[in-house]
Image: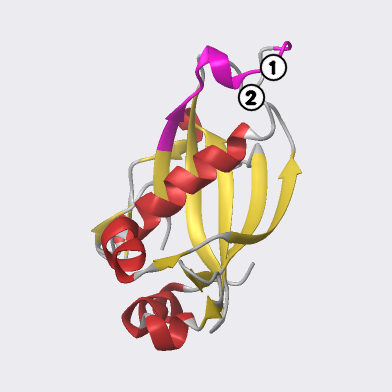
Amino acid sequence: MHVHTPIKVRYGETDMMGVVYHANYLLYFEDARIDFLNALDFSYAERIEGAGYMSPIHDIEIHYKAPLRYGEAGIVRTSIAQNLPMRTVYRQQVYRAEDVMEGEAGGRPEPQLREGATPLVDALVTVCVVERDTFKPVSLRRTFPDLYAKYEDIVEEA
């Protein structure tokens, strides 16, 4: 399963060269992870924060391959690369909007990548779940077993 989150590069998100400043991809990725959870009918604000937890980033591996520029439209393509009891690894890739086409997978609408499309940015973002008050890590499998089970059904190899 892939969730595609549209982005439009604003002037303030770019550097002096007119390309997206590298740290702004982290903001795009965060929005895309929220969209991913929403696509699974699992609201981050209601289900995770509402239950007294947070999901901070544990680790990020990013490869910047080509720039996205001011005024361009892009897509963040999010999937589950690894599902562990204490951590979730998301694969998040940025493509130009024109590299993503209408399509379907498993009988449901899901945009497809144009043949030959390559990501501009390719990242593995590892998050964990912690208690809000103590920042103590908790098991996703025990704390949110329904979400863990959904992730098990859709996980892909990184």
State the image coordinates of residue 41 (x, y, percent, origin top left).
24, 63
The kind of residue on which mark 1 rests is Asp
How many numbered circles does the render carry? 2
- Local packing at callout 2 (Cα closer than 10 Å; few below 14, some 14-19, many 20+) is many
In percent of width and height, residue 145 lies at: 36, 85
- Looking at the image, residue 124 sits to the left or right of residue 156; the answer is right
Q: Is residue 114 above or below residue 108?
A: above
Tell me the element at label 2. loop
* Image quarter (top left, top right, bottom left or bottom right) of the N terminus: bottom left
The magenta stretch spans residue 119: no
Q: At 56% across and 77% down in the image, what residue appears?
A: 137
Q: Which residue is mark 1?
A: 15
Height in image: 56 above or below 152? above
Q: Are marks 2 and 1 in contact (CB under 8 Å)?
A: yes
- Label 2: which residue? 20
Pick the residue in front: 117 or 17. Answer: 17
Where in the figure is residue 116, as x and y percent of width and height?
A: 61, 41
What colour scheme does the image use?
secondary structure
**3D distance between C-alphas at marks 2 and 1:** 6 Å
Q: Secondary structure at mark 1?
A: loop
The stretch drawn in magenta includes residue 14? yes
| Residue lying furthest front | 133
Give the mark, 2 or 1, whose residue is nearer the N terminus: 1
Q: Residues within 10 Å of mark 1 (few under 14, many from 20)?
A: few
State left or right for residue 5 relative to residue 90.
left
Tell me if residue 114 can be seen.
no
Amino acid tagged 2: Val
Q: Residue at x 37, y 80 (%)?
A: 144
Q: Which mark is residue 29?
A: none
Residue 66 or 101: which is nearer the viewer? 66
Magenta segment = 6-17
Which quadrant of the figure contains the C terminus?
bottom right
